[in-house]
Image (cartoon, rainbow, N blue to C red):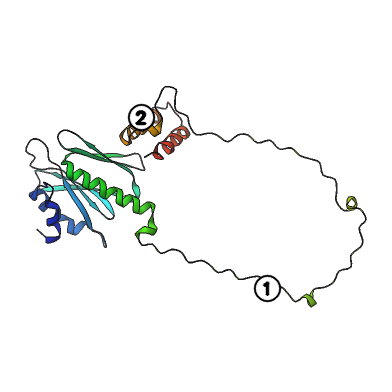
Amino acid sequence: MKEQFKKFLNEEQDPKAIEKITSKLTDLLMKGEEVGYIAVQKKPAITVFPDSIVLTNKRIIICKPKNLGLSMDFTDYTWDDIASTFVKENILGSEFSFGTKTDLAVSIDYIPKIQARKIYTYAKEQLDLLKNPVQAGTPVQEAVQVEEPVFEDEDEVEEVETEEVTSFAEILPATPVVTETYEPLPTQPTQPAGERKLSDLSKEELFDKLQNYKKLLDNGLIMQGEYDAYKKEILSYM
């Protein structure tokens, strides 16, 4: 096993699972891509072929063995496609899940709690870097200098003879006074009576509410515009 992957054996990761994954990651990683953390599924019963999740500085890679461990399926999601991440701690391990901007929900259960906390923290850091690119080393755009306009010499301006105006009414036509009315702008969707405010809900409850609205849209019970408004409001509280 390569030296740079030995650091992922400190939080109860299965050494055999790490070895299988890292043997294939060398060919999967892109230029400039670095592995930040690897979490391995650990079910109560003996798991011969556990699922794993790899977090890099560019994406999340889900690794699922198949054909008795002879091959493996890899599914990746770039950070700019991820809308939110969640961790739910259960009695036996934790469940790490994330939602994409296309309303796709992905989750892996039975992750040891310390591993789940590590991948959650790493994911939040990567999402924060996307929201604040200046902190990631992006140079600030230099101020553009605007040249002052150059005026012609006063001597070259042609003099125009003007006539004396005794009344403004001679040059200003009378214009009718027009009164315009404006319709009030549409307001954000309001919560139905009896429901808790979005600000009082946890991230997991917000995620469940978003999925419920998606089901209503798929069943034709609400319009696309209503769903987009609910989605925008819910994501603002995540």
Q: Residues within 10 Å of mark 2 (few under 14, many from 20)?
A: few
Q: Which mark is residue 212?
A: 2
Pick the front one: 193 or 59:
193
Q: Is residue 132 above or below residue 145?
A: above
Among numbered discs 1 and 2, the one appearing first in the sequence: 1
Which residue shows up at 68% across the image and 35% down it?
181
Which residue shows up at 38% across the image and 62% down it?
138
Which residue shows up at 41% across the image and 30% down it?
197
Counting the numbered discs, the total is: 2
Q: Is residue 161 above or below residue 93?
A: below
Q: Which mark is residue 25?
A: none
Left or right of 224: which side holds 4?
left
Name the image quarter holding residue 33. Answer: bottom left
Residue 108 pos. (x, y %): 21, 40
Disc 1 element: loop
> Circles 1 and 2: CB distance less than 8 Å?
no
User: Which label lies toward us, 1 or 2?
Assistant: 1
Q: Which residue is mark 1?
A: 150
Q: Residues within 10 Å of mark 1 (few under 14, many from 20)?
A: few
